[in-house]
Image (spheres, rainbow, N blue to C red):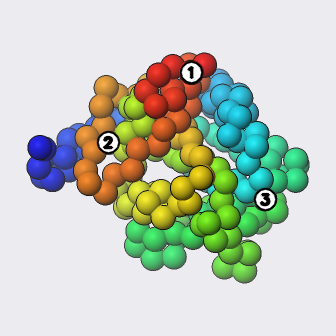
Amino acid sequence: MLGDGWIAARKAALRREARERGAGGSREYRARASAGICQGLWALPELEAAPVVLGFYPTPAEPDITPVLEGLLAGGRVLALPRCISPGMMEARQVRSLDDLSPGAYGLLEPGEGAPLIPWGELSFAIVPCIAADRRGGRLGHGGGYYDRFLAWAPGDMAAAMVCFSDRLVDAVPMGELDIPVPLVVTEEGTWREGALWS
């Protein structure tokens, strides 16, 4: 069994490698890849059937999923985005327009404290960000544990998909006891469902 120290060191190395690859990617690639990822998300039957969706507002280094967020709002879905409330802890707050977001923790755009709170148990689908991922759903985040805690508390019938640029896919993300895999991995080159290419 791999030790915690080895896992932490390997994750740190993978984060550096992923950020270096991301820094070398062109704006044109990110735009083209983001469009492909959005198309992959819309193809998921789990998203099509979900009345209440947790998304995230992307940073410039992440896939631009704002067309999906806007499409969900236009379609009358309930859309929630994370709001960081303390180190490692976030909550889901409903948004009715992406124009209502403002910088919060770490400078990320998020709903204000006056936005309606959505209990975790009401979520039916989640779109999850990452720095890097493997095809079996291993996820590498920024290291704060926000999404691992969320996924551990999420309702058992909630579906989730991780979005990842294909150049951020790695052979294997080392997983510790608290790491939660995400069974759907959506890239611009295809979607992996529990490690098998689905589309």
Which residue sits at x=44%, y=60%? 152
Amino acid type of disc 3? Answer: Val
Mark 2 neighbour class, 10 Å CA radius: few under 14, some 14 to 19, many 20 or more: some
**Number of numbered discs overlaid on the protein picture:** 3
The residue tagged 1 is 198
Q: Position of residue 92 (x, y in %)?
A: 62, 67
The residue tagged 3 is 78
Which residue sits at x=65%, y=59%? 123
Which residue sits at x=73%, y=48%? 50
Mark 1 neighbour class, 10 Å CA radius: few under 14, some 14 to 19, many 20 or more: few
Image quadrant assignment for residue 68: top right
Between discs 1 and 3, the one toward the N terminus? 3
Using the rendered image of the protein, determine whether residue 119 is visible from the camera's viewpoint. Answer: yes
Give the farthest residue toward the front.
157
Q: For the residues marked 1 and 2, what is the alpha-carbon distance in whole angstroms?
A: 26 Å
Using the rendered image of the protein, determine whether residue 102 is visible from the camera's viewpoint. Answer: no
Image quadrant assignment for residue 80: bottom right
Which residue sits at x=42%, y=37%? 137
CB-based contact (under 8 Å), mark 1 and mark 3: no
